[in-house]
Amino acid sequence: MTATVTHRLPMVICEVTVVRAERLSPSYVRVELAAPELADFGVDGPLLDQRIKLVFPGASGRVPSFAGADESWYATWLDLPVPERAHMRTYSVRDVVGAGADTRVVVDLVLHLAEGATGPGSSWAVDAAPGDRLVLVGPRRGIAFGGIEFDPGTARSLLLAADETAVPAASRILADLPRTARGTAFLEVPHAADVLACPAPPGMDVVWLPRCDGDEHGTPLVEAVRRHFGLGRVAGLVVESVVDPDLWETPTYSSSGEELDGAVTVGHDLAGLYAWIAGESRLVTTLRRCLVGELDVDRRQVAFMGYWRRGVAMRS
């Protein structure tokens, strides 16, 4: 069953086949996805943290067809019966290799082993193998698609902070930065064996933070960022009740609806900083309070993105 759509859509929606699946580490599986339609996939510039959507097979073992889809493709997908709709999740592109009809999109998927790998993406990734099929929704080259939040402008110093779900995006950003970039990237992962090759400009310090036994998810990352700015330790992550479940705040968008107009004002000599923070929502909220609340970093200098929320099913 084909999932190819017509050229009318500003994005590529197609059924893709796994041509390679590799267990990189205890927590990561890398897949290469291929389809002739991916010849049109791409962005006019660096990939950075470009997001795509993947639709995994449902209970039937099949993926839904998007043949003939138009601009209402998402609403049409939502209207499908649950067994046919399957599960749609958002991922960052780790790489694009090949060209033309041989273009392949590379995606690193996280195995949430601490949660039992029960999510649709994690469950699928455990047994991913060549020949498996998915549906991919991504940018069509030459058409503005969105999905890239990393935008440092003329910042003189960078801060990247990511948990394991955001490490693929952070790794792509580091690979795409200019050689003159300066700053620090803090990357928290579940295990020491999850520390992967991560090329970066010479002026970027990449600090891996494997969790130790007993570490709460996010605690090593929060403590490392606070030490970086000379702040003391805190008791832990913020409580669930103060977490915005849709936490997504960039220099141009706020999930809270707050206006971001006005001049940039910042204290603590951090006027040249740009921060990109992504991961579990409690972790991101805690770091937001650190930067914006304690260090007075202007919100126009940061991108805070809650990729997931512990114990809550992700939305597509």
Image (tube, rainbow, N blue to C red):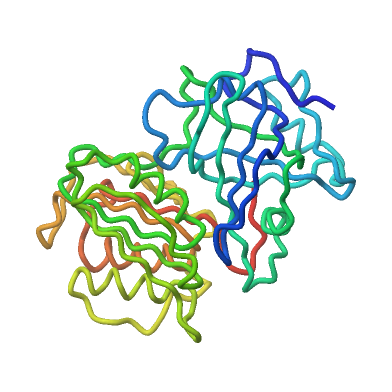
Compare residues 23 and 300 and report the one nearer the observer. Answer: 23
Compare residues 90 and 98 and report the one nearer the observer. Answer: 98
Q: Position of residue 113 (x, y in %)?
A: 64, 70
Q: Position of residue 260 (x, y in %)?
A: 31, 43
Q: Is 11 on the left or on the right of 77, as rendered?
A: left
Q: How many marks?
A: 0
Q: Position of residue 268 (x, y in %)?
A: 12, 62
Q: Residue at x 52, y 72 (%)?
A: 241
In the figure, 12 relative to 130: above or below?
Answer: above
Q: Quadrant of residue 37?
A: top right
Q: Quadrant of residue 81?
A: top right
In the figure, 197 relative to 259: above or below?
Answer: below
Q: Is 52 on the left or on the right of 253, as rendered?
A: right
> Which residue is farthest left?
269
In the figure, 22 relative to 259: above or below?
Answer: below
In the figure, 39 relative to 233: above or below?
Answer: above
Q: Residue at x 74, y 56 (%)?
A: 127
Q: Residue at x 35, y 39 (%)?
A: 252
Compare residues 304 and 124 and report the one nearer the observer. Answer: 124
Q: Residue at x 31, y 65 (%)?
A: 207
Q: Is 272 on the left or on the right of 115, as rendered?
A: left
Q: Position of residue 224 (x, y in %)?
A: 30, 72
- Image quarter of the N terminus: top right
